[in-house]
Image (cartoon, rainbow, N blue to C red):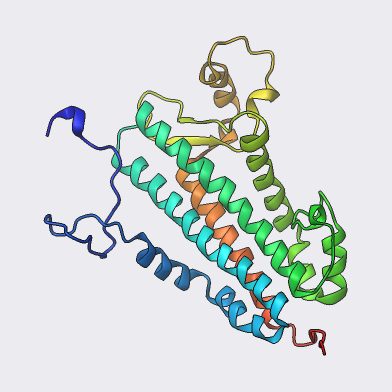
């Protein structure tokens, strides 16, 4: 195979065979099987919500199950993006091509992660028949707090969990990343400053470039160098970022699910 035909990105087998493969099944197209198993291992309490939705009347049950299915699928996509970032980062040289792929995957990782929070807010909304305007259905209570007030009235344990400063700070930061990507400029993902460029890093504060408007350089990397020397912790290795955010989104989904499961005081309305 010529150099021009080599591949930078291949998908790991994960023990699922590729149909018709003649190379001992080193790679696979059966992503569904592998990521389905991973989701089952990580979202233990969340999966119970699908069965528990049966206690509601038909229309509400179907709405809840649509959002539950949506979370399942996008959770698998988030994990897929995380896996590909690690594979490219650890298996390839840090160059323009690997930076292109890592930045693409991490953008998807961020957008999909925040979409999971939105769907989780809608599950809570439908679970308790809150009848809020769609713009009020968010787990970012600092942005809008009507959902928080409603939850506090119906499930104090769930409200106490979601109102923690640690949780709200994290939700706010994730939203800032999402907003920066979708509505503003870019989130900067670049090689770590230094002679070897062995790690890719991501800015800890979305929109970091805007905080230093007096730098007159053609490239953000050039403007960033003196900032790095003075404030090295303003950038975070992308693998640490992905691990941290994936762990946090999983924890939130599982804890919210557990609080909904354990809320024995809530009785859904009966319809004749």
Q: Quadrant of residue 52?
A: bottom right
Q: Residue at x 29, y 42 (%)?
A: 91
Q: Identify which residue, 137 or 66, lies in the foreground.
A: 66
Residue 155 makes an appearance in the image? yes
Name the spot of residue 243 as percent of width and height, x first.
Answer: 49, 53
Name the spot of residue 12 as percent of width and height, x first.
Answer: 28, 54
Dividing the image into 4 quarters, which one contains the N terminus? top left
Answer left or right for 24 relative to 209: left
Q: Identify which residue, 243 or 36, lies in the foreground.
A: 36
Dividing the image into 4 quarters, which one contains the C terminus? bottom right
Q: In this rendering, is residue 70 above or below 99? A: below
Q: Residue at x 62, y 9 (%)?
A: 216
Q: In this rendering, is residue 255 above or below 205? A: below
Residue 205 makes an appearance in the image? no
Q: Residue at x 65, y 30 (%)?
A: 207
Q: Identify which residue, 12 or 4, lies in the foreground.
A: 4
Name the spot of residue 109 as percent of width and height, x first.
Answer: 52, 48
Q: Identify which residue, 62 or 158, lies in the foreground.
A: 62
Answer left or right for 244 relative to 172: left
Q: In this rendering, is residue 218 above or below 57? A: above
Q: Residue at x 67, y 34 (%)?
A: 183
Judged from this view, the residue extending furthest toward the front is 272
Q: Quadrant of residue 218?
A: top right
- Count of labels in the image: 0
Name the spot of residue 231 as percent of width and height, x first.
Answer: 60, 29
């Amino acid at each position: 195979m010529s150099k021009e035909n080599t591949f930078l990105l291949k998908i790991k087998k994960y023990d699922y065979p590729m149909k018709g493969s003649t190379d001992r099944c080193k790679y696979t197209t059966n992503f569904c099987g592998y990521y389905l198993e991973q989701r089952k291992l990580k979202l233990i309490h969340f999966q119970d919500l699908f069965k528990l939705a049966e206690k509601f009347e038909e229309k509400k049950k179907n709405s809840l199950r649509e959002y539950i299915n949506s979370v399942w699928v996008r959770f698998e996509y988030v994990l897929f993006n995380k896996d590909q970032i690690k594979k490219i980062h650890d298996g390839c040289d840090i160059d323009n091509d690997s930076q292109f792929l890592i930045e693409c995957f991490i953008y998807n990782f961020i957008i999909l992660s925040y979409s999971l929070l939105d769907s989780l807010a809608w599950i809570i909304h439908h679970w308790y028949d809150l009848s809020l305007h769609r713009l009020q259905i968010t787990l970012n209570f600092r942005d809008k707090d009507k959902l928080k007030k409603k939850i506090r009235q119906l499930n104090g344990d769930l409200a106490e969990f979601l109102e923690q400063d640690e949780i709200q700070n994290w939700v706010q930061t994730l939203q800032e990343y999402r907003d920066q990507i979708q509505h503003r400029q870019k989130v900067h993902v670049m090689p770590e400053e230094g002679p070897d460029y062995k790690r890719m890093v991501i800015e800890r504060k979305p929109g970091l470039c805007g905080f230093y408007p007096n730098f007159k350089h053609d490239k953000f990397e050039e403007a960033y160098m003196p900032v790095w020397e003075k404030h090295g912790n303003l950038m975070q290795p992308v693998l640490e970022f992905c691990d941290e955010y994936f762990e946090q989104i999983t924890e939130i989904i599982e804890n919210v699910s557990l609080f909904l499961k354990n809320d024995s005081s809530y009785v859904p309305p009966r319809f004749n």
